[in-house]
Image (tube, rainbow, N blue to C red):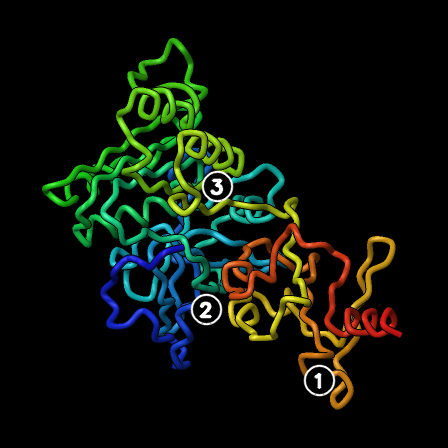
Amino acid sequence: MSSMLKTNFNDPLTSYTGLPKPEKAIQTFRVENYPGIISAVNQLTYDTVEVVVKYQGDAFIMAQAGQYGTLKVNGIDRARAYSFAKSPHLENKSEVTFFIRFVKGGEMSNWLQQQNRVGEQVIVGGPMGKFSLDTSNKTIVCIAGGSGMTGIKALVEQAAHDLLERDCLFFYGARTQDDLYCLDEMETVARKWHPKHKFTFIPVLSREPEDSNWQGVRGRVTQHLKDQYLDKAQLSVKDIKAFFCGPPGMIDHGLSILKSAGLDNKDMFFDKFEDMSSPAPVINNAKCTLCDECLMVKPIANCIVETGGHTHSKGKTTTQPVMPGLTSGLYYNTLFINSDSCIRCYACVDACPHDAISSSNSTIPNILRQLSETSSTLSS
């Protein structure tokens, strides 16, 4: 992702934990966990709620618009990752807001619906992610669906606050009118947008009954972008930057459409929402330099662990403990992502400066010591 939006902070590279500034080529922020309580739960639609968390003490997550954090609650083993729902300048002091959509069978969904959760103790982690606006003057084209409203909403709120001198079209895909929310917020963004430029919000409904009173656009949001804006030359790929947030299928379709129209990969930015059915990232230890950047952004304690090596057999990985004096140092130690503990937030993928972490990496360990031993055997 390109450089971040301007914020009110004096220096966004100064860590709120007091740590020294990391290199710009590496992860900008450090992840911390903060205890707090749920101060409000507000219904947005029949299946989406706004959850407001108030930190305990004077804690403050130095997030930028478009980033995300984690929410850990009592009774659920793993934290869950959600985009921050507001631009930082709109949050109350010591508060952070998430939008959570209920998913059938989802642990967090069930937990929220069981009883009134106001006053419950929780832990918020963050910030994570590099999803933010670039610094060009090209038209901003945002495409979101479902709960992907959250990340894009924060981006455009920040852009309006900063009086960004760019036009913006925000295409939002939902199923029916009952699924639409934040309409008032979008009107506020339009009013506050730079006076010499224009913000346009375009909701597109895919399952709205034919006999309803809906006068807006129907169909797939990505197809509407193609049919009415790209094919009819209302938008030129030479003059836009595209930002996606939402279901993986929607993002994949939108990326394919824009690539076919000639938009370069570097001009498309996205933040897919993954669940536990998605593959966990894997560390290629032949590329890993043990710079510890992934360890600095992991949201929970045991998702990434340091080992003295690990083996993979019959679909199962066995890790070896670190033995001081025997397994210390780059040559012997390796990092391992425990897929059973991983919450699929992919913060480690974003943080790695050496492209060593990916969900497409082989699950068979690729360890420097093993490579060296293999090489020595072959040479002898």
Residue type (three-letter) at the residue carrying disc 2? Ile
Quick one: SS at disc 2?
A: loop
Q: Quadrant of residue 217?
A: top left
Residue type (three-letter) at the residue carrying disc 3? Arg
Q: Residue drawn at (27%, 33%), measured in percent from left and top?
A: 201
**Marks 2 & 1, CB-CB < 8 Å contact:** no
When the figure is inspected, residue 49 is found, relative to residue 174, above or below; the finding is: below
Q: Residue drawn at (41%, 78%), measured in percent from left and top?
A: 17
When the figure is inspected, residue 215 is found, relative to residue 71, above or below; the finding is: above
Q: Which residue is mark 3?
A: 101
Q: Position of residue 349 (x, y in %)?
A: 55, 59
Task: Point out the residue furthest to the bottom here.
Answer: 325
Residue type (three-letter) at the residue carrying disc 1? Ser
Q: Quadrant of residue 64?
A: bottom left
Q: Position of residue 342 (x, y in %)?
A: 63, 58
Q: Which residue is mark 1?
A: 328
Q: Which residue is mark 2?
A: 26
| Gap between marks 2 and 3 measured at Cα | 32 Å
- Residue 93 - label: none
| Gap between marks 1 and 3 measured at Cα | 45 Å
Residue 177 seen in this snapshot = no
Query: Quick one: label 1 or label 3, which is nearer the N terminus?
Result: 3
Q: Position of residue 133 (x, y in %)?
A: 32, 51
Q: Residues within 10 Å of mark 1 (few under 14, many from 20)?
A: some
When the figure is inspected, residue 376 is found, relative to residue 189, above or below; the finding is: below
